Image (spheres, coloured by chain):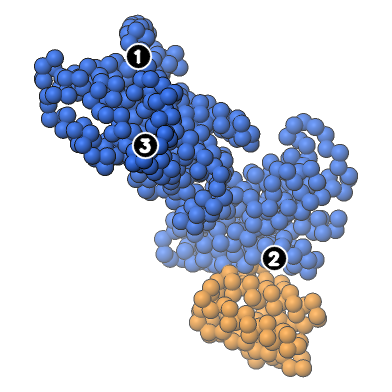
Chain colours: A blue, B orange
Amino acid sequence: MTGIDAIASFLGGLGLFFTGIRSLSANMLQIGGRPLRHAVAGHVSNPALTAVVGIAAGALLQTSNGITFILVSMVTAGLLQIATAMPLLLWANLGTSALVAVAAIDLRLVTMLALGISGIWLYIDRSSGTTRRQVMEVVLAIALLFLGLEMLRAGTAGLRTNGAASSAMALAEASGVGAFLLGFVVTLFTQSSSATAILAVSATQAGLLPFQGAVLLVLGASVGSGVSVVLMGSSARGSQRQLVLFQGLTKLLGVAVVLPVVIVEDLTGWPLLLRGVQTMAIDSGQQLALIYLACQIAALTVCAIPSRPIRRLLSAVAPPLETESLARPQFIYQAAVGDADIALILAEKEQTRVSARLAPALERADDVAAGSIAHLCAAIADFLASIAGSNDGAVAALPRAMLDRLANLQARNEVLRSLYETVHQMARARGALPPGPADRLADALAQGLGAVLMCADDAASSGAAEDIALLKQLSTDRSSVVDALRRRLIPEANLEAVDRLTSLFERAVWLVERYALLLEASADD
Amino acid sequence: MQGRILQPRGRLDIATYTAFERDVLAAIEAGSPWLVFDFSDLLHVSSVGVRVVMMAAKRLRAIGGRVAVCGMQTPIADVIEVSGLNPILEIYADRASALAALP
């Protein structure tokens, strides 16, 4: 093979490889993203299933960075706790080793068959967006990836003596630091340590890269992957940032364990990791795949054992946002459902977190906080439904008094949810008003209602009869008061925004009255 | 025991209400049987300010005391009315009228 042939084969192979791996991840994220979310939501409580789901996700999606951001979205949406997302991510990293291991095997025949079948299928099948077509696109992507590797192997053989491209590999051969940096830089570009590891496997099998240089290149790739995910998630905040930093830390700690072992083995000649993988596999590419696997296992072990200190560190570096804390229940937890008496007390305390946010919600329309409160109310409603046994259709065997209290709390929850939504809408309507008489009316309504909402929170927190009695007095019908105010301040009384604002105010007062009556009924019981 | 007259000035909002609340609590804890809030120098009242008036009304009513408000300018009167406090408070045009009505 001439120099130009080798370069063409190398570049063509690289292009096919990158196209294949990008297409594989994109299609697998489309096909597997939803099942992954369902699997995660359904099985996260079981550690063994967490491991299975994590490994399967890593092996199939082949992008630990992609999985990181799926989990980030789920944590943000409140579908997953960060404490559960972390072990999933560790297992997913392990799962990405699968493709590296497969790449070390000679799959020329299978590659050509897959390429033929998928290519012909996609030519005949004109449908778009179907799962069948996406599966075939995945098969084609895998075939392109392996075909690219074959071309790379052929091209790298020619590059041993020719071409400027060999200078990078020569750097890796001459210096361990150079190999490490090469792996780091290539991964910043590919954003996938498994992709870089697969390239290293091919280069080693073609004899272009010495085994020890390839090991350091794989370790550099792991650090590069960690840095790349942190860079990609640089805009993340709170729990999102914690998860992104955790993925970066995982990669770094895996290398921090493996690299000293490799250096000690190199300096002393003691039979450690490198000798170990050499006894497990003859082929240098397979040995490298085992090193990649060892790096993921090291990260899994280091991060899984001291998970609490790591979580504390991440919480200190990237504290949860106020809105995240708001959405997360602080008192209720599923295991408490068994003791209905305690569970109802916890639910009532959780509701006071909603009532405390009513008055501040009037000051500024905060859509994120509104979403958090809606999520918290839904969590309380689910919890109360679990106490009632209505989630699984069973009839709760609760005493009558407790059933009354449960029904009261359910009704209060619904009133609080509606009240918060009304107050939030009022803040939005108020924010949209230009300065002038309408704005002055809005301010009077907001300040007056704010005081009533604070009184509602006092009554809910204390449960004292005098607080509830005051709240009842303050929540009597205000339609005549508001109407008079509107007529005086706004001559053109049919102003749409003002009408909306005043009707929201009247609804809020009506809801407060209902809330006061429910508090009173609860106190009487 | 004498009642107390409290006269906040300017704005009664999140930045200023704590001092006002401290004065109100001190008066109640000192055993004042009534309080007069003279709002004639008050330009703006926010929800936290209204809450202090509510708290004073609740605590004094519980021990048979009285709370009067006087000298309210229109924007202040609007907020107090909207908050539903009018039936709970004794409202007078000025300080002299309030003091004349209280023991």
- Marks 3 and 1: in contact by CB < 8 Å? no
N-terminal label among 2 and 1: 1
Relative placement, left or right, of B31 versus A426 is: right
Q: A438 or B36, which lies in front?
A: B36
* Image vertical order of residue B32 relative to residue A196, above or below: below
Q: Which residue is mark 1?
A: A106
Is any part of residue A508 visible from this angle?
yes
Q: Give the chain of mark 1.
A: A
Give the amino acid type for the residue marked by disc 1 in the picture: Asp
- Marks 2 and 3: in contact by CB < 8 Å? no
Q: Give the chain of mark 2.
A: A
Residue shown at the point (27%, 29%) measured from the top left: A210
Q: Secondary structure at mark 1?
A: loop
Give the amino acid type for the residue marked by disc 2 in the picture: Asp
Q: Which residue is mark 3?
A: A269
**Residue A458 marker:** 2
Nearest to the eye among marks 2 and 1: give it.
Answer: 1
Q: Secondary structure at mark 3?
A: loop
Residue shown at the point (74%, 77%) measured from the top left: B59
